[in-house]
Image (cartoon, rainbow, N blue to C red):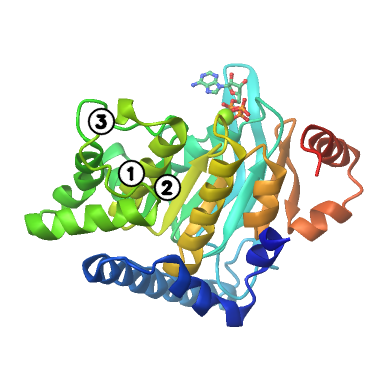
Amino acid sequence: MTDDKEAALPKGEEESLTAELSPDVSPVVQEFMAEAAQANEEEAEAIAQDTTFAADAGLAGAAFSTASLIGPYISFEHVCKSFGDFIVLEDVSFFVNPGETLCILGRSGVGKSVSLQILMGFLKPDRGTVLVAGQDISGLSEREMQEVRRKVTMVFQNGALFDSVSVGENVAFPLRERRTMEEDQIQQVVKGLLEMVGVAGMENMLPSDLSTGMKRSVAIARALAAQPSAVLYDEPTTMVDPLMAHLLGDLIQRLKVQLHLTSIVVTHDMRFAQKLADRVVFLHEGKASFFGTMEEMHASKDPVLQEFLALDALVLPN
Ligand SMILES: Nc1ncnc2c1ncn2[C@@H]1O[C@H](COP(=O)(O)OP(=O)(O)OP(=O)(O)O)[C@@H](O)[C@H]1O
Ligand SMILES: [Mg+2]
């Protein structure tokens, strides 16, 4: 199956895939993306060095001592979150390495969206450490969080686009905020980003004119315009047809290969997870009851996880 082939991304295929996926992206966009990719790589290297230093000094968290040589870009360490007496997350730990994709799986109401909101600083954890690019964000002020949100952006389910302005202006927004680009450069980057996410030429439409899947693509283009290092997606495939889901999966995979973006994807869709995930975390009854690779997940004997997978196979027969 081509999906599996893409998910594995053998080294030799990366280059041809990259070339094939953006055949006519304008030079301005290529430059814009290359700038982001280089910054992401430099940041990843800096984190790797920091982590090596921390490990040498015996400071690395015990839970992450078996992490790969490159340190995590984002991690939850013993995170707890309750609303009143209602415990949503109880001692949850997981991580995602730079340039990798983590899928968060679990039944409805287990705290998947809450986890993303904690990462964006919209909710604060009661206990535990939340690291983004080596920085503990759990105690940051709103102003400090705005800096973090330049590195980590979120694609909301409904796209969260500004309804009253055009698609083009939605994507241009982060570019204008930077105040460093000329107008014609902004227009070219917007055009190229829209091409890249598969909605070429829709600059002048209003978000209300678009389908759910197209809105999500535009939301991804807007997220990319901020040149983030990591993108968080909350259920990107719900309410779109299987073809659109497939295209969104291809897009997320392409961003990983071309821009080395780190991604966290909340999904119910196991095929999607199979295609994208380097690691998965399965949340259940407040705990990260499984955290590991897809292969390890399928080999797991955890009855709740097995039931989840079996139910998914029933809902989505091959
Ligand atoms: N701001 C809040 N105040 C009170 N309770 C909340 C708040 N946000 C989330 N919750 C509760 O936390 C629990 C986890 O919610 P969350 O939205 O993370 O679930 P989820 O895993 O994303 O589920 P779904 O798959 O249905 O989207 C739910 O019981 C929800 O009602
Ligand atoms: Mg949710």
- Say which quadrant the N terminus sits in: bottom right
Q: Which amino acid does label 1 sit on?
A: Met
The three-letter code of the residue at mark 2 reads Ile
Give the alpha-carbon distance from disc 3 to disc 1, as whole Å.
30 Å
Do residues under tags 2 and 1 come within 8 Å of each other at their CB atoms?
Answer: yes
Q: According to the image, label 1 marks what residue?
A: 145
Q: Name the residue under label 2.
A: 137
Please name the residue shown 24% across and 34% down the image: 205
Residue 300's place in the image compared with 12, above or below, is above
Q: Which residue lies furthest to the bottom in this view?
A: 12
- Percent from the top left, x then y, of residue 292? 73, 56
Check disc 3: other Cα within 10 Å, few if <14, some if 14-19, many if 20+.
some
State the residue at coordinates (64%, 51%): 94
Residues 316 and 295: in front is: 316
* Kind of element beneath mark 1: helix
**Image spot of residue 45 (x, y percent):** 44, 76
The quadrant where residue 235 appears:
top right
Q: How far from the left and from the top, in percent, is residue 170?
A: 24, 39
Examine the rendered structure and indicate whether residue 251 appears above or below residue 104.
below
